[in-house]
């Protein structure tokens, strides 16, 4: 679940999807994602991010920005998650990308009391 939340937050940031960001940050905190990781995703850097979180964030950014993954990142995640987990993570990134585009097209704002992503 934590991996999916990290991917979803990274997708939300990359697409500037305010609604998705607000929907994910509360869950991230409940899953004990460090504030440094949340801040790094929000501010679009990787400083202070634990290595296991940085792998997910970097994988997501590469896929969304370059539409490809470098060999080292792919190998690391395949080793960590196996083929099924690798495909599930990639599918989750695709799903949250679809969701982000949809809520952006509809101009959905963050839910009441949700953290607002500044875009």
Image: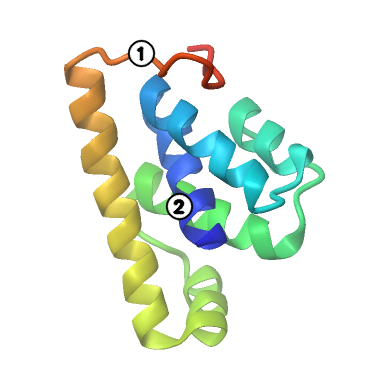
Asked which colour scheme the image uses, the reply is rainbow
Res 98 → quadrant = top left
- Residue 96 horizontal/vertical position (percent): 31, 45
Dot 2 falls on a residue whose secondary structure is helix
Q: Is residue 19 left or right of residue 78?
A: left
- Above or below for 104 versus 53: above
**What's the distance in space between the residues labelled 2 and 1, CA to CA?**
23 Å
- Crowding at label 1, few (<14), some or many (≥20) Cα neighbours within 10 Å? some
Q: Residue at x 78, y 39 (%)?
A: 36
Which label sits in the foreground, 2 or 1?
Answer: 1
Dot 1 falls on a residue whose secondary structure is loop
Mark 2 sits on what residue? Answer: 60
Asked if the residues shown at circle 2 and circle 1 are in contact, with their CB atoms under 8 angstroms apart, the answer is no
Q: Give the total number of marks visible in the rendering.
A: 2
- Residue 35 horizontal/vertical position (percent): 76, 38
Mark 1 sits on what residue? Answer: 109
- Above or below for 73 versus 16: below
- Above or below for 48 versus 3: above
Q: Residue at x 53, y 12 (%)?
A: 118
Q: Residue at x 17, y 19 (%)?
A: 105
Q: Residue at x 76, y 46 (%)?
A: 34
Res 91 → quadrant = bottom left
Q: Is residue 36 left or right of residue 103?
A: right
- Residue 88 horizontal/vertical position (percent): 33, 71
- Residue 94 horizontal/vertical position (percent): 26, 52
Q: Earlier in the sequence, mark 2 or mark 1?
A: 2
Q: Is residue 9 left or right of residue 33?
A: left
The residue furthest right is: 48
- Crowding at label 2, few (<14), some or many (≥20) Cα neighbours within 10 Å? many
68 and 23: which is toward the camera: 23
What number is the disc on residue 69?
A: none
72 and 53: which is toward the camera: 53
């Amino acid at each position: 679940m934590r991996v999916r939340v990290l991917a979803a937050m990274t997708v939300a940031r990359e697409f500037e999807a305010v609604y998705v960001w607000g929907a994910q940050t509360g869950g991230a905190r409940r899953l004990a994602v460090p504030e440094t990781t949340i801040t790094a995703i929000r501010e679009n850097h990787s400083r202070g991010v634990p290595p296991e979180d940085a792998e997910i964030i970097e994988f997501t950014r590469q896929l969304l920005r370059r539409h490809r993954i470098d060999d080292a990142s792919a190998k690391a995640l395949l080793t960590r998650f196996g083929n099924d987990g690798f495909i599930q993570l990639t599918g989750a990134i695709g799903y949250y990308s679809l969701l982000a585009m949809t809520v952006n097209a509809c101009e959905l704002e963050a839910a009441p009391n949700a953290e607002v992503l500044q875009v």
